[in-house]
Amino acid sequence: MNNSILNYEEKMWQLLDATKGEMPDLADAYYGSVKDAVYREGVINLKTKRLMSLAVAIQAGCKDCMISQTSRALEHGATAEEIFETCSVAISMGGTLAWSNALVVADYLREKEIIK
C-alpha cells in the first residue's frame, strides 16, 4: 500500500471534483461566491489568509484542509519557516492533538522535498 501524502492529495482533488459534479448548486455557491469573498486580496494578504486557514485546519483536525491550505500557502509564497510558525501557534492553542495534526503538514513538506 502506498502511503504517499502526495498520492493522497491527488486522490483528494479528484474526489472533490467528483462531489462537486454531484452537488453542482452547492459547489457553485461554496466554491464560488463564498470562497471568492474570503480568498482575495484585502487588508490581509492571501498568504496570511492561507496561513490562518492552516492554523484553523490543524485545530479542526481536517487532513484534507491541512494539505490544501499548506499547498495554497506555498503557492502564495509562504516559506517552510512561516508554515511551521503557523503550526506552532496552532499547537500552542491545541496541545498534543494539534501537534499530531501538524505532522500531516510536516509529511507533506517532506514529500515535496521542502524539508528533510
Image (cartoon, helix red, strand yellow):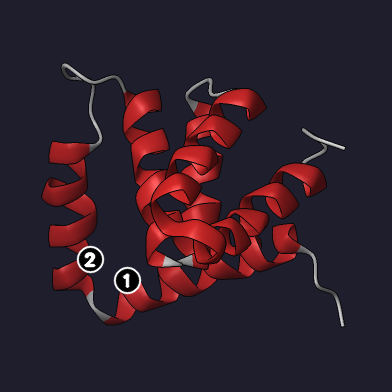
In depth, the one of 101 and 9 nearer the eye is 101
Of residue 52 and residue 69, the one placed in the foreground of this image is 52
Classify mark 2: helix, strand or loop.
helix
**Hey, what amino acid is under mark 2?**
Ala
Residue at the spot of label 2: 27
Q: In the drawing, what numbered circle is on residue 58?
A: none
Q: Residues within 10 Å of mark 1 (few under 14, many from 20)?
A: some
Q: Is residue 25 above or below residue 36?
A: below
Q: Residue at image x 16%, y 70%?
A: 26
The x, y position of residue 56, in whole percent, is 35, 52
Q: How far from the left and from the top, in percent, is residue 40?
A: 23, 28
**Left-right relation of 64 to 11:** left
Q: Earlier in the sequence, mark 1 or mark 2?
A: 1
Give the quadrant of the C terminus.
top right
Q: Looking at the picture, how far across and down is residue 78, in whole percent?
A: 54, 24
Residue ID at (62%, 50%): 105
Residue under label 1: 20
